[in-house]
Image (cartoon, rainbow, N blue to C red):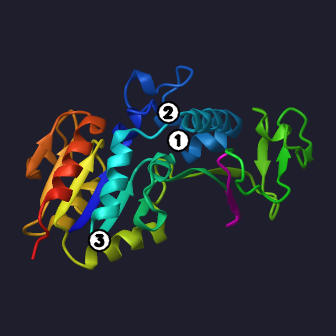
Amino acid sequence: MRVLVITGAGVSAESGIPTFRGKDGYWRNLDPAKLATPEAFAKDPRLVWQWYRERRQRIRNAQPNPAHQAIAKLAQHAREFLLVTQNVDDLHARAGSPKEKMVQIHGDIFVTRCSRCDFQFRDTGRGGSPEPPAPRAIYPHSGRSIAPTSAQHGQENLLPKCPRCDGLMRPGVVWFGEQLPRNELRRIENYLEDGPCDFVIVAGTTATFGYIVDWALRAIASDGELIEVNPEETPLSGFATQRCDEPAAIALPRLVDQLIAQPPKL
């Protein structure tokens, strides 16, 4: 069984992570879609960092839900498997989805990278995570550039600076208007070029980005099955061989068990 799974914000929303759409996604009465841009970061990096620090903490406090767990289970049973997620959180990984079978196409919120050079580090704040080598920081009100202590590192007025080139560090996510990461795109293309999929599951995404539709339709080719899990119809709904309007945390465990129970295709 060859499988492609594509997930969006609706899957993590069931773990309490707000989506960008709707009133629940607003932060301090600000539209997240207007904060997640290079222009917003250039204008007020301190405000953007405050938002991302709060998002990181909310994700740390969240737990994977049955949808995440069902996808991890499917990854173990499928002959070939790739998960492409639009979510920048770590809930798929914490549910057991293997890193080598997962692409975070919009980046990783726990990565901090330099806006000028290629320096980056990842820190989940869970203990045992790699710490950045002596990061520098600039405090906006004083203009002083110093190396922060670990206690200072989490302060809201801290803007991390790159220890290599002194450039401003930013969250390692893809903002609106930015290009998707080339290496991750190549991984998806390689998987699609290796052959058609028996099943494609698209869950919790509005599929408003054209590349989501393109990947799903290319993966099923001529005789694969497209299963969509979303309470509302999307641009993919008309192509789905099976549609489920239940929440992903309810629908996916059942769907995955059904797929695993099927006899292998010859």
Which is more foreground, mark 2 or mark 3?
3
In the rendered image, is residue 229 in sight? yes
Q: Specify whether residue 116 is painted magenta.
A: yes
Q: Specify whether residue 68 is painted magenta.
A: no
Does residue 55 sit above or below 81 in this rendering?
above
Give the structural element (helix, strand or loop) at label 1.
loop
N-terminal label among 2 and 3 = 2
Magenta region's main secondary structure? loop
- Label 3 and label 1: CA atoms lie apart by 34 Å
Residue kind at label 3, given as amino acid type: Glu
Give the magenta range: 114-124
Q: How crowded is mark 2: few (under 14 residues within 10 Å), some or many (20 or more)?
A: some
Residue 28, position in %: x, y? 57, 21
Residue 218, position in %: x, y? 19, 67
Q: Mark 3 points at which residue?
A: 80
- Label 1 and label 2: CA atoms lie apart by 6 Å
Tell me, yes or no, whether the two marked residues, 1 and 2, touch with CB atoms within 8 Å: yes
Residue 215, position in %: x, y? 26, 62
In the rendered image, is residue 211 in sight? no
- Label 2 and label 3: CA atoms lie apart by 36 Å
Residue 82, position in %: x, y? 34, 64
Residue kind at label 2, given as amino acid type: Pro
Question: On residue 32, which mark appears?
Answer: 2
Q: Could you say which is closer to the camera, residue 265 or residue 24?
A: 265
Q: Quadrant of residue 230?
A: top left
Q: Could you say which is closer to the camera, residue 34 or residue 233?
A: 233
N-terminal label among 3 and 1 = 1
Residue kind at label 1, given as amino acid type: Ala
Question: On residue 36, which mark appears?
Answer: 1
Give the structural element (helix, strand or loop) at label 2.
helix
